[in-house]
Image: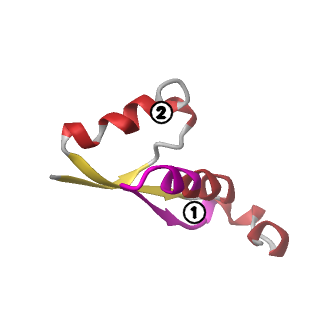
Amino acid sequence: MIFETHAHYDDDRFDGDRDTLLASMPERGIKRIINVGASIASTKTTLALAEKYDFVYAAVGVHPSDVEDLNEETYQ
């Protein structure tokens, strides 16, 4: 069993085949995936992936390069 510990499958590069790719993971031996959100926007898309796929887990936060956009409104 492979446990992917740091992924960004919410990235735009996967827009064309994200669902097909993720659906194929378990049959390829990848049983767990931690998708990482590093901004407010990618945290939201990471949470959506974790809700959609029971083998995808979300690690969420804000990367230091994106903290200038962090305020009480965006944090909510």
Residue at the image point whose x is 46% and y is 42% from the top? 9
User: Residue reaching furthest top?
Assistant: 16
Mark 1 nearby-residue class (10 Å; few <14, some 14–19, many ≥20): few
User: Residue reaching furthest right?
Assistant: 73
| Magenta stretch contains residue 57 | yes
Residue 37 lies, in percent from the top left, at: 54, 57
User: Residue reaching furthest bottom?
Assistant: 72
Rendered position, 28 above or below 46: above
Q: Which residue is mark 2?
A: 18
Mark 2 nearby-residue class (10 Å; few <14, some 14–19, many ≥20): some
Whether residue 8 sits left or right of residue 55 in the image: it is right
Q: Secondary structure at mark 2?
A: helix
Q: Which residue is mark 1?
A: 63
Pick whichever of labels 1 and 2 is earlier in the sequence.
Answer: 2
Residue 41 lies, in percent from the top left, at: 68, 53
Marks 1/2: CA distance? 23 Å
Residue at the image point whose x is 26% and y is 43% from the top? 26
Rendered position, 2 above or below 20: below
Q: Which image quarter holds the C terminus?
A: bottom right
Residue at the image point whose x is 69% and y is 66% from the top? 67
Magenta segment range?
Answer: 48-65
Q: Amino acid at mark 2?
A: Arg
| Magenta stretch contains residue 22 | no
* Residue 12: quarter of image: top right
Cβ atoms at labels 1 and 2 below 8 Å apart:
no
Whether residue 35 sits left or right of residue 45 in the image: it is left
Rendered position, 4 above or below 62: above
Rendered image: mark on residue 2: none
* Residue 72: quarter of image: bottom right
